[in-house]
Image: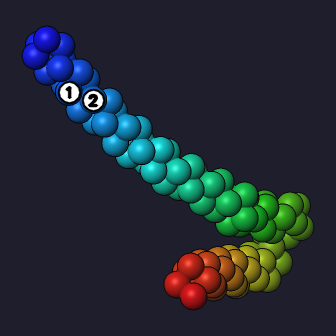
Amino acid sequence: MTLVKDDITSMKGDISSLKNETTLMKSEMTSLKNQTKSIKVILENVTNRHLKTIAEGHCDLSRKLDEAIKGNVDEEQLLVRVGLLEDDVRLLKEKVNTIA
């Protein structure tokens, strides 16, 4: 009879341990989902936009090389910098919202 009680006590401990592991796994999954979402947002909003900006600038290369280099390089650099600053502001807003 005591062996059965000991086995039941052991099983209760094992079940409790499994519940703790499940809770930990759920929190890790939530963290991974948030990280994946952040990566997707960066890809969609930052990388794709900057690639599009650079690609649009290179469509004009059929013009004279002098004209293409003179005007578009500075404009492209400014657009990329503005894009990066916008993303930094977005991240700061998200941090402020999570703190508040």
| Mark 2 and mark 1 residues within 8 Å of each other at the beta carbon | yes
Helix, strand or loop under label 1 = helix
In the rendered image, the quadrant that contains the N terminus is: top left
Residue furthest to the left: 2
Helix, strand or loop under label 2 = helix
Report which residue position mark 1 lands on: 9
* Residue 62 image offset from top left, x and y in percent: 88, 61
Of 41 and 76, nearer the camera is 41
Residue type (three-letter) at the residue carrying disc 2: Lys
Neighbours of disc 1 within 10 Å: few (<14), some (14-19), many (20+) = few
In the rendered view, does 63 fall on the left or right side of 1?
right
Please say whether residue 58 is visible from this viewpoint.
Answer: no
Using the rendered view, name the quadrant where residue 78 is placed.
bottom right
* Residue 97 image offset from top left, x and y in percent: 61, 83
Using the rendered view, name the quadrant where residue 5 is placed.
top left
Residue 12: give its label: 2
Residue 25: give its label: none
Q: Mark 2 to mark 1: distance in Å?
A: 5 Å
- Tell me what residue is drawn at x 38 percent, y 46 percent: 24
